[in-house]
Image (cartoon, rainbow, N blue to C red):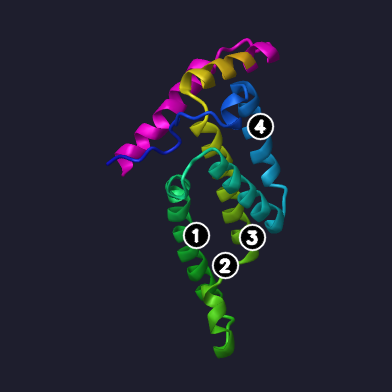
């Protein structure tokens, strides 16, 4: 059974009614904003987007499936963190547990990535590929861009679910 990572799902909640070009701009702005928040602000953002995810009638399992690539990345970061802590070799016996702890910067990165994936998932699950293409073209027109990149971007976005179905 394939995974429906970032795939559109029919519905009629609030996010389905927002025009695609606004969703795309929100994705960019909110994702950018998360990288300036501290850990507490990002955790609050994660809870807010998890609640919004549920309000759109998406299950907790769907949310976890969309976060699956981040969990793999977290495991990798954890192993690198342990390796880094062991190489520093400045722990005594009473501080042995610190070898297995993330440092603050790694924790911030993980929380920010989770928040960014959640907002991306919410937007891509409530917007069809045609709406995304129209939204990108609308942004191109409003910005009066000479290069037409909407077709290229939508091709990349269309392949995200296909790549993850193949990966799993």
Q: Secondary structure under badge 4?
A: helix
Residue under label 2, please give it. Answer: 102
Question: Magenta stretch mostly in which secondary structure?
Answer: helix
Q: Does the magenta stretch include residue 159?
A: yes
Q: Which residue is drawn at 60% across and 42% down?
A: 52
Quick one: label 2, few (<14), some, or many (20+) residues within 10 Å?
some
For marks 1 and 2, the one nearer the N-term is 1
Viewer-nearest of discs 2 and 4 = 4
Distance from Cα at disc 4 to Cα at disc 3: 25 Å
Question: In front: 99, or 28?
Answer: 28
Which quadrant holds the C terminus? top left
Q: Which of 120 and 108 is in front in this view?
A: 120
Q: Quadrant of the N terminus?
A: top left
Q: How many marks?
A: 4
Query: How many residues crowd mark 1 within 10 Å: few (<14), some (14–19), many (20+)?
Result: some
Q: Earlier in the sequence, mark 4 or mark 3?
A: 4
| Disc 1 to disc 2: CB gap under 8 Å | yes
Q: Which of 68 and 83 is in front in this view?
A: 68
Spatial CA distance of label 3 from label 1 is 11 Å
Q: Residue 26 carries which label?
A: 4
75 part of magenta stretch: no
Q: Distance between the residues labelled 2 and 4?
A: 30 Å
Residue at horizontal 69%, vertical 13%? 142
Q: Do the residues labelled 2 and 4 touch (CB within 8 Å)?
A: no
Disc number for residue 77 = 1
Q: In which quarter of the image is residue 117?
A: top right
């Amino acid at each position: 059974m394939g995974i429906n990572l970032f795939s559109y799902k029919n519905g009629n909640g609030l996010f389905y009614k927002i025009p695609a070009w606004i969703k795309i701009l929100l994705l960019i702005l909110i994702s950018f904003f998360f990288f300036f928040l501290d850990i507490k602000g990002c955790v609050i953002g994660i809870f807010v987007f998890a609640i919004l995810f549920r309000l759109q009638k998406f299950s907790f399992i769907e949310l976890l499936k969309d976060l699956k690539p981040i969990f793999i990345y977290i495991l990798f970061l954890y192993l690198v963190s342990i390796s880094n802590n062991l190489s520093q070799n400045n722990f005594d016996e009473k501080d042995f547990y610190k070898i297995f702890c993330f440092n603050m910067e790694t924790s911030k990165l993980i929380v920010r990535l989770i928040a960014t994936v959640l907002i991306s998932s919410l937007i891509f699950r409530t917007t069809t590929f045609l709406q995304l293409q129209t939204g990108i073209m609308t942004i191109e027109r409003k910005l009066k861009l000479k290069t037409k990149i909407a077709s290229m971007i939508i091709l990349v976005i269309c392949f995200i679910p296909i790549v993850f179905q193949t990966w799993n």
